Image: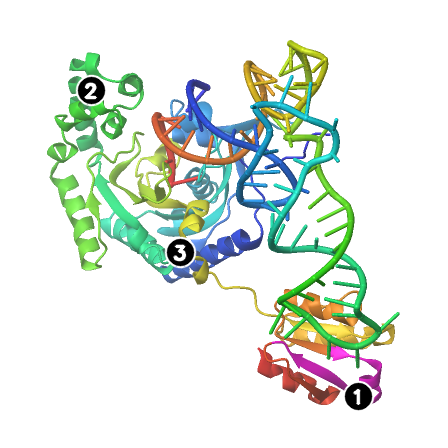
Amino acid sequence: MAKLQPVRGTHDIMGDQARTFQFIQGVFQDIATRFGHQEISTPIFEFTEVFSRTLGETSDVVSKEMYSFEDRGGESLTLRPEYTAGIVRAFISNGLQQSLPCKFFGSGPMFRYERPQKGRMRQFHQLDVEILGVAEPQADIEVLALAATLLSELGLMDDVTLEINSLGDTESRLANRDALVTYFTAHKSSLGEDSLARLKKNPMRILDSKDEGDRALVADAPRISDYYNQASKAFFDEVLAGLDALNIKYVINERLVRGLDYYSHTAFEFITSKLGAQGTVLAGGRYDGLMEIMGGPPTAGIGWAAGIERLAELVSPDLVPGEPRPIAIVPVGSDCQEQALKIAQQLRTAGHAAHMSYRGNMAKRMKRANKADAIAAVIIGEDELARAVVTIKNFDDGSQTEVSLDQLMNHLSHYR
RNA sequence: GCGGGUGUAGCUCAGUUGGUUAGAGCGCCAGAUUGUGAUUCUGGAAGUCGCCGGUUCAAUCCCGGUCACUCGCCCCA
């Protein structure tokens, strides 16, 4: 029989990794709450249209990366490849325009049919933050401050740099795009194969090309910043001033772009050099045009997503809290089982971690307790019970004391 | 989707220039120790050498395909 394998690009999360994930999500929830965001969990699948409409038919995600399937009713459903589309859909479904601004956070699995690599899975997990209904640059600043706080509390600020850019408003961006198309079309013959395709689908992406020949062309290409109108320039300046005020370091990267039409103004990525080709750890931007594409009322939006797997690769293990050291319950002889159960229950109710020892002679039980990193063992034997006492063994110094059942909980409170 | 690398025990890895019973360390189980852990000693289980096919008297080793992982590209978190 062939080895039972998980589906390509999926993983079981357990042990240290599970603990690291939990730590990251806990820090994230705490910070997001401090920033005034509320949790939202949207379904992990939606009608396919939710994603195909928002992401655009020509985008890579829609054209080759979606996990789509028909349900029994013949509806085309898709496992979510990203969080934003679902949140925007939820906003419209629930009529939340009545309660703007909406500040959301969420986390969970995402699905993309990609060729797996380290830091890139078919099922992966993201943290997500969105602010809907704030057209002011203050939202951009806050969302970036949230990101910076998260990365700093995860101990990653030294591993990561913030790259930021502005696409300008619609007017500025379209003017720049036209100029780019004109420029690159004139130099079509020197463009690489990938970039030729981008010229049609997503011309701004050429700016980000890794092809050497393209890069030479890009150096002389029209610059986005030359096409900012006054409002766009003022907006970007205000965002940068906010970052300066908060002492958040950044690098302006004019090649950092978003292709789809509903993006505008701020685009940013926190990047690390420690993860090979998958260097983007957290990324986002402003998407003021998205709500309308979805059929909702014109509503500004900005947000970001971070890959939990990628963060987990970077987080130092010593930051992740270990499991609490348990107290081992060691009954000796079958007559002591009931008392052992009761003591375990008492301990757990009082907030201790208690590990019940299930089988074996005493040496075996002690061995297991030691392996579980127990801080102490409660040894429950017939001799002791006859005198209404138990023996407490301290695993760190090897000392033993007899404690009366009455005093047990009191005594063990020292072991927290 | 495109190109390169890798695949031997639960884990980390040796090894066989193609030859009969494939090894180590760690881990696991048991015993020394039926009321006392970490150390020590002894023993044990565990592998269709990723899978399928080809070449060969003979394949874990060579060849082809396939699956998975991995590195880069595309794209992205």
Which of the two discs, 1 and 3, sits closer to the camera? 1
- Taking A194 as reference, is B71 left or right? right
- Residue at position x 11%, y 39% from top? A230
- Residue at position x 15%, y 47% from top? A237
Q: Is residue A372 visible?
A: no
Q: Position of residue A77 (x, y in %)?
A: 55, 30
Mark 1 or 2, nearer chain start: 2
Give the SS element for disc 3: loop
The chain to which mark 2 is attached is A
- Residue at position x 20%, y 20% from top? A181
A133 in magenta: no
The chain to which mark 3 is attached is A
Mark 1 or 3, nearer chain start: 3
Marks 3/2: CA distance? Answer: 40 Å
Judge if badges 3 and 2 mark residues of a common chain. Answer: yes
* Most foreground residue, A340 or A346: A340
Q: Is residue A187 visible?
A: yes
- The tally of labels here is 3
Identified by mark 1, the residue type is: Ala
In the rendered structure, find residue A43 and report the number of the disc placed on it.
none
Which of the two discs, 3 and 2, sits closer to the camera? 2
Give the SS element for disc 1: loop
Identified by mark 3, the residue type is: His
In the rendered structure, find residue A181 and report the number of the disc placed on it.
2
- Taking A101 as reference, is A47 left or right? right
Residue at which label 3 appears = A37
Q: Is residue A394 above or below residue A28?
A: below
* Most foreground residue, A194 or A99: A194
**What residue span does the magenta drawing correspond to?**
A379-395
Judge if badges 1 and 3 mark residues of a common chain. Answer: yes
In the rendered structure, find residue A388 and report the number of the disc placed on it.
1
